Amino acid sequence: MKLRHHAFLDEARVREAIAAAERETSAPIAVSVAPHFFGDVRKTAERAFERLGLTKAPHRNGVLFFVVPARRTFVLFGDAAAHEALGQATWDTIVAGVETHFRNGHPTAGIVHGVEAVGRALARHFPA
């Protein structure tokens, strides 16, 4: 369970959601909130994925929610096996749910929703 601290999210709620999801799946799930930066959000998310050690998951099933509040955007990034197991439609559905919460001004609820959804989906393929 990894969460980089930032006031944008309620850290306790997000940590609880990650812990609950990780009790159901062997997949590591992380959330990182990025400060202001210049450059490509997706590429920065990929670097964060590696820096957080998610590439070292034995089943290549790690997942990262990389949030950039200043740009009002996020990237949901899954390692190779996680992406393949869930399929694009599942990823798209999770992203849409998170985006809805973000648009309504509830970023913590969005990330919690996303973590719970990705945890349930991964548990079917990578049980704890």
Image: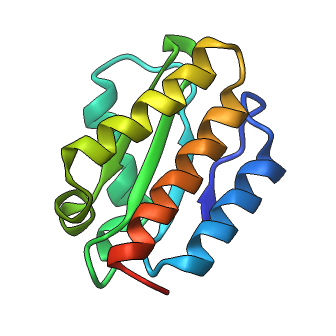
Q: Residue at x 28, y 32 (%)?
A: 42
Report the coloring of the rendering. rainbow
Q: Is residue 81 left or right of residue 22?
A: left
Quadrant of res 23: bottom right
Q: Residue at x 31, y 47 (%)?
A: 90
Q: Is residue 69 visible?
A: no
Quadrant of res 76: top left
| 27 vs 100, nearest the viewer | 100
Quadrant of res 43: top left
Percent coordinates x, y for residue 24 in the rendering: 56, 78
Q: Residue at x 22, y 57 (%)?
A: 83
Percent coordinates x, y for residue 120 in the rendering: 49, 64
Percent coordinates x, y for residue 40 in the rendering: 28, 23
| 1 vs 101, nearest the viewer | 101
Q: Is residue 10 visible?
A: yes
The answer to whether residue 76 is above or below residue 123 is above
The answer to whether residue 31 is above or below residue 53 is above
Q: Residue at x 29, y 68 (%)?
A: 55
Q: Is residue 1 left or right of residue 63?
A: right
The answer to whether residue 25 is above or below residue 29 is below
The answer to whether residue 47 is above or below residue 33 is below
Instruction: Specify the quadrant that holds the N terminus.
Output: bottom right
Count of picture labels = 0
Q: Is residue 92 left or right of residue 114?
A: left
Q: Is residue 92 left or right of residue 120?
A: left
Percent coordinates x, y for residue 53 in the rendering: 40, 68
